[in-house]
Amino acid sequence: MNPRRFFSTLGLGVLWLAAFLIVPSLIMLGYSLLTRTDLAQVGPPWTLENWGRVFGYDALFREWVPDNLRVLWRSLVIAALSTLLCVVMGYPLAFYIARQEDRRKQMLLLLLVIPFWINFLIRVYAWILILRPFGLYPSTAATFLGMVYALLPFFVLPVYASVEKVDWRLLEAAQDLGASPLRAFLAGVVPQTLPGLIAGVLLTFIPALGMFVVSDILGGAKTALIGNLIQNQFGQAGDWPYGSALSFLLMGAVLLGLWLYARAAGQKGLEELL
């Protein structure tokens, strides 16, 4: 293969992945094997103690305390439920927007993305003023609400793009052959929107799994997620080796979820990529 042609097609992508994914991951892996000193510095000796702490082994007391795994499980559940709420709310919304006339459609899309014009932290803090009179702040319910509010546009937009390309003649053909409206929709329309649905789920679930701002502000100490635990290690605790190991735990959970979802959805291309 011509080296110039290879670099012009794949070379820039490989360099981008190497610079912003592979190299930072290797640096983080190196940090996870180091030791935090008494002065909050990081250095030798090399150790696997941080990885033991990730999976719940306390080297000081020599016992298993799987608190991190509980936090990870809580994060997975909240991310999955938030994604499910986005699917329930966003899937019909995408169809509603796509079926409107052009002028109204543009207005609805503008209303969908206009919150991005305001700083994310300001929008999250605004929910405190809304929820506090109803006694919902801080709480797990407030965290769910904040997650769905923040991530719903990321689900709706790719689904809307798929709905725009739907061939509605398949729906009419299924109805002409005697299928009920629901069966005709499931057989003739849903498969055409599957790429957008999968993209929307991934764009919702992955940020929800690692998000810490919403749970920190709206959930407080009642809803500590894996993202909060990682942020605390790199912030207040100053334990970068432990935070790096926790980050790899989160990365592994995300990749495992992507792989399982790819198998279930039959997306061979994504499965080969992972």
Image (cartoon, rainbow, N blue to C red):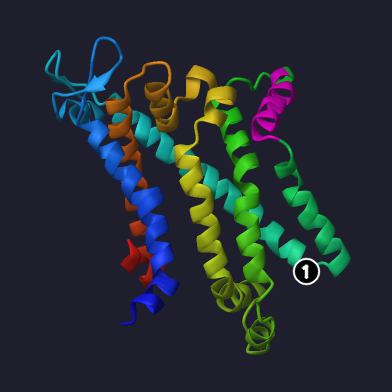
**Eyeballing the image, is 2 above or below 206?**
below
**Eyeballing the image, is 232 above or below 15?**
above
Q: Which residues are magenta?
A: 119-132
Q: Residue at x 15, y 14 (%)?
A: 60
Residue 267 shows in the view: no
Q: Position of residue 265 (x, y in %)?
A: 41, 66
Q: Position of residue 212 (x, y in %)?
A: 50, 31
Q: Does the magenta stretch mainly form a helix, a strand or a loop?
A: helix
Q: Quadrant of residue 250?
A: top left
Work out which quarter of the rendered image holds the C terminus and state it. bottom left
Q: Quadrant of residue 35?
A: top left
Q: Is residue 126 magenta?
A: yes
Residue 128 shows in the view: yes
Give the total number of marks visible in the rendering: 1
Tag 1: amino acid: Arg
Q: Residue at x 31, y 82 (%)?
A: 1
Q: Is residue 102 left or right of residue 30?
A: right
Q: Is residue 156 left or right of residue 129?
A: left
Q: Residue at x 62, y 70 (%)?
A: 162
Q: Which residue is mark 1?
A: 99
